[in-house]
Image (cartoon, rainbow, N blue to C red):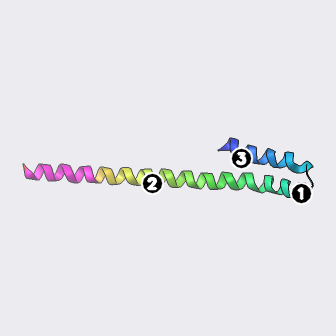
Amino acid sequence: MILVALFIFFGGLAGATRPNGVLSILGAVCGAPLFLVVAALLWRVFCESLIIAFSIHETLVEIRDTLRGSAQ
């Protein structure tokens, strides 16, 4: 994730020698942090969904064990 942001940043700075160099620098300065923020948000959503899925799994296991105990 950080490597991609660095690639965007330095790629934009390297493109500053072209006729639209100002836009390239602007893209590098804005694009790299924006990528990091979006990637961090997506990572957080993924981790939170894993926590919720594990919580649901544990609840279902407890219900199953309770039902097995009452059936015996």
Q: Quadrant of the N terminus?
A: top right
Q: Dot 2: what SS?
A: helix
Instruction: Identify the disc placed on residue 61.
Output: none
Find disc 3 in the rendering and name its residue.
5
Q: Residues within 10 Å of mark 1 (few under 14, many from 20)?
A: some
Circles 1, 3 touching at the beta carbon (< 8 Å): no
Amino acid type of the residue tagged 1 in the rendering: Val
Mark 1 vs mark 3: which is more N-terminal? 3
> Foreground: 35 or 16?
16
x and y percent of residue 3 in the render? 69, 41
The spot of residue 23 in percent (x, y) is 85, 58
What whole-number distance in Å separates the C-alpha atoms at marks 1 and 3? 19 Å
- Please tell me in which quadrant of the rendered image residue 20 appears: bottom right
Secondary structure found at label 3 = helix
Label 2 and label 1: CA atoms lie apart by 40 Å
Relative image position of residue 9 (x, y in whole percent): 78, 47
| Front disc: 2 or 1 | 1
Left/right placement of residue 5 relative to residue 51 reads: right
Q: CA distance from mark 3 to mark 2?
A: 25 Å
Q: Which residues are magenta?
A: 60-71
Residue placed under numbered mark 1 in the picture = 22
The mark that comes first in sequence, 2 or 1, is 1
Q: Which residue is mark 2?
A: 49
Q: Residue at x 42, y 51 (%)?
A: 51
Q: Are marks 2 and 1 in contact (CB under 8 Å)?
A: no
